[in-house]
Image (spheres, rainbow, N blue to C red):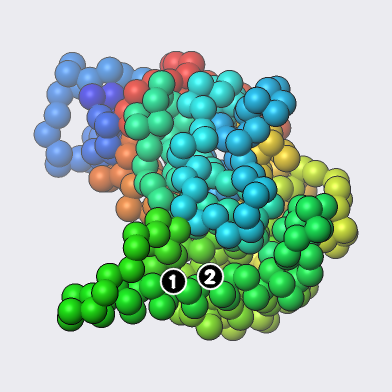
Amino acid sequence: MKLIKNARLLLESGRFKEGMDILLDNKIIKTGRASEWEYEFKEADCEILDAHNCYVTPGFIDAHCHIGICENGMGFEGEDVNEITNPITPALRGLDGINPLDQSFLEAREAGVTTVLTGPGSANVIGGRFCALKTFGNTIEEMLIKEPAALKAALGENPKRCYNQKKASPMTRMATAALLREAFYKARAYGEKKNAAGAGGEAPELDMGMECLLEVLRGELPLKIHCHRADDIQTAIRIAEEFGISYTLDHCTEGYMMTDVLKAHNARCILGPILIGRPKIEMKNLSYSGAAVLERAGIEFALSTDHPETPVQLLNVSAAYLVRNGLSEEAALRAMTVNAARITGLDGRIGAVKEGLDADIVVFDGHPLDVRAKVLMTVINGRVVYGGL
């Protein structure tokens, strides 16, 4: 066991509390002040780590990126993020294209990012399955938290551009929406045929893509929808609710322009990348104060680097830039911790320094939203994977 003492600990509220102690093994065992605990333990049996004058947070969560599947500095050989041969590819598993030895995983944990949601890109209307990984391990199996964690879909400019170059559908937003709907109607029919087979009907031939879409239709797997523009956000909501699908709005660049719609539909939003210019038309209304607008409207959100668009190690720097542009510090910290865990369905495992959750902890020598602050130590599943005290 480890006992971290005298920490400024980040609470789920997004505020820090002084003089906190954390007892951990692979899970968080106890938090608070050790002198007040009724829990019996002997300090002599613990590794004591003094975090006096340090800021301690849960491990940060990047809620949408392509780390490992779009490898750092590798060019085509390490580019496994988009299978641009068919616009509907739900059977693809990001897991099978991720290199766990991508150096970006090391850079992530050096910056306090302990969990990533990573997987296929947005060239296809349905791109394949995302997974949730810890950022330490030699194999995907060691790193894995959840697979599948979501099914990736994309609206807007990317599918249009990629298939226009091939002179194939979809070349318009209409075709993109039609293909997405068609895929779910086909999956529904496939499921009905499977059910009928149990009553003596003929079973359909196994189709792994349809099986994945059925998981989405049954509410077992959320649809992770790439959408920047307001019209694409509205289309995402329209189609998802048409089929009763659980979904997140990823990027949500123009979400700040339609907060009434987001609130009316209780939309779960993932913002980012933040530290980026406006590299394409659908991002022309990117606003660095947009997150503050969402906060004022009472809309909680998670943050994304969309790595490699913004390097994963700049997640907290992205959050700091949003604070500079009006977002509260508390909301910025929640967007990388408790909100990110809840929005991605991982709050039973990560997102807070709380009893029973995974022991993913980061110790900073300064406030984590101060770009000068350094990570002194990163702990994943109770193991020190970077630095030390």
Quarter of the figure with the N terminus: top left
Q: Residue at x 65, y 33 (%)?
A: 79
| Disc number for residue 179 | none
Label 1 close to label 2 by CB (< 8 Å): yes
Q: Residue at x 75, y 60 (%)?
A: 168
Residue 282: x, y in percent?
82, 61
Q: Amino acid at mark 2?
A: Ala
Residue position marked by numbered label 1 in the rendering: 187
Q: Quadrant of residue 164?
A: bottom right
- From the viewer's perspective, tell me whether residue 9 is left or right of residue 153: left
Q: Nearer the viewer, residue 5 or 321?
A: 321
- From the viewer's perspective, tell me whether residue 268 is left or right of residue 75: left
- From the viewer's perspective, tell me whether residue 161 is left or right of residue 144: right
Residue position marked by numbered label 2 in the rendering: 183
Q: Residue at x 18, y 16 (%)?
A: 44
Q: Amino acid at mark 1?
A: Ala
Secondary structure at badge 1 equals helix
Residue 266: x, y in percent?
54, 76
Q: Residues within 10 Å of mark 1 (few under 14, many from 20)?
A: many
Residue 51: x, y in percent?
44, 25
Decide: is 95 above or below 189.
above
Q: Nearer the viewer, residue 98 or 325?
A: 98
Residue 90 shows in this picture: yes
Residue 144: x, y in percent?
38, 37
Decide: is 311 above or below 158.
above
Outermost residue, left side: 40
Secondary structure at badge 2 equals helix
